[in-house]
């Protein structure tokens, strides 16, 4: 199969070093990383992959991934990581080449000009659609350890620290006399200053933007990841990062969190007493179970296989016509 992927970031999105307590251009970047991993996975599965993404002439791509700056017409299907791209849609519609896009964000009453594949069933249900594929990660980017230090970890885009439930994490850990480490950055220095002040007030440690081996270490050494988000979460990348590290999760029941989590790898909480119970019983979650669950459900090759099934489903009518 010949596939053109497109994304609007600077390739590759994976960064080996974070910005610490300084601002960062992409506080998350997880959707970009998903598209990079999909390109790699498709190439590893033997498909011809062209990747329309920002890059320099010196950029080295994953094996089998051909970086391009112009549109490629000799493809079977086009897969975008963007909500609307009229240029792509118009260009390929005229050539009868199907265009799909991964949808990471819920916007009420939005009607895309092309087929969407949502990142969770929760998302697909909101749009009354059937196609969804869970996000995937490379397990080699994470360190698995059964030994944990005595701290809990909160990671989020801190430009949305209240929506992500930092206040709940701070109040809960302080009330239970637990140590909390807070990671994440923002494009806005005032967000960083505000979160730093909050952490000082609640005796938490703010480490800022962490990436690569530094992030892998704080994930695997944490007793648990806490994500008491108040948002209607469309997936939960940080949750599966923790699971790949053998680190259990304590999270809210908002959005897709309840969909991707199970009682074997963490606690999905609705009330203050639920959070208190989770902290009390977190040692009952086995790190090996967390890692196994992540490998079986969130490996990037698993994600790739699901997308290939969807590509084939879309292309099947066209193939029958050409018989």
Image: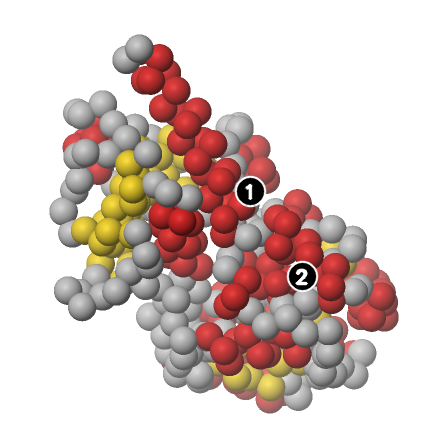
Residue at 19%, 34% in the rendered image: 74
Residue neighbourhood size for the residue with mark 1, other residues' Cα within 10 Å, grouped as few (<14), some (14–19), many (≥20):
many
Residue at 55%, 74% in the rendered image: 216
Res 152 seen here: no
> Mark number for residue 271?
none
- State the SS at label 2: helix
Q: Position of residue 198 (x, y in %)?
A: 58, 82
Q: Quadrant of the N terminus?
A: top left
Q: Is residue 172 above or below residue 134?
A: below
Q: Position of residue 184 (x, y in %)?
A: 49, 74
- Along the horizontal axis of the image, is 244 left or right of 118? right
Residue neighbourhood size for the residue with mark 2, other residues' Cα within 10 Å, grouped as few (<14), some (14–19), many (≥20):
many
- Along the horizontal axis of the image, is 302 left or right of 3? right
Q: Position of residue 82 (x, y in %)?
A: 33, 46
Res 141 seen here: yes
Between 165 and 69, which is closer to the camera in this rendering? 69
- State the SS at label 1: loop
Residue at 14%, 47% in the rendered image: 70
Q: Which residue is mark 2?
A: 291
Q: Quadrant of the C terminus?
A: top left
Give the quadrant of residue 163: bottom right
Residue at 50%, 60% in the rendered image: 138
**Going from the N terminus, do you reach mark 2 or mark 1 first?**
1
Q: Which residue is mark 1?
A: 120
Q: Nearer the viewer, mark 2 or mark 1?
A: 2
Between 43 and 93, which is closer to the camera in this rendering? 43
Between 34 and 155, which is closer to the camera in this rendering? 34
> Given the current orientation, which residue lies at the most extreme front position?
46
């Amino acid at each position: 199969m010949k596939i053109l992927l497109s994304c609007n970031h600077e390739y590759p999105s994976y960064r080996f070093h974070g910005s610490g307590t300084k601002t960062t251009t992409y506080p998350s970047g997880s959707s970009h990383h998903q598209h990079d991993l999909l390109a790699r996975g498709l190439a590893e599965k033997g498909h011809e992959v062209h990747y329309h993404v920002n890059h320099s002439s010196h950029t080295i791509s994953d094996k089998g991934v051909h970086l391009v700056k112009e549109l490629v017409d000799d493809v079977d299907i086009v897969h975008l990581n963007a909500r609307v791209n009229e240029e792509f849609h118009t260009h390929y519609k005229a050539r009868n080449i199907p265009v799909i896009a991964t949808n990471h964000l819920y916007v009420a009453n939005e009607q895309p000009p092309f087929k969407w594949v949502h990142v969770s069933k929760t998302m697909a249900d909101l749009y009354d659609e059937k196609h969804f594929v869970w996000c995937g990660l490379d397990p080699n980017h994470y360190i698995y350890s059964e030994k944990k230090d005595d701290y809990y970890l909160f990671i989020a885009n801190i430009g949305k620290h209240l929506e992500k439930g930092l206040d709940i994490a701070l109040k809960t850990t302080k009330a239970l006399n637990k140590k909390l480490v807070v990671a994440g950055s923002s494009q806005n220095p005032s967000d960083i200053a505000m979160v730093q002040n909050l952490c000082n007030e609640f005796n938490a440690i703010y480490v800022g933007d962490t990436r690569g081996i530094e992030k892998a270490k704080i994930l695997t050494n944490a007793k648990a990841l806490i994500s008491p988000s108040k948002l209607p979460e469309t997936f939960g990348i940080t949750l599966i990062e923790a699971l790949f590290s053998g680190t259990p999760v304590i999270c809210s029941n908002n959005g897709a969190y309840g969909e991707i989590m199970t009682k074997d790898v963490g606690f999905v909480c609705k009330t203050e007493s639920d959070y208190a119970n989770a902290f009390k019983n977190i040692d009952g979650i086995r790190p090996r179970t967390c890692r196994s669950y992540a490998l079986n459900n969130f490996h990037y090759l698993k994600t790739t296989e699901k997308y290939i099934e969807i590509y084939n489903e879309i292309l099947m009518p066209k193939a029958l016509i050409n018989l």
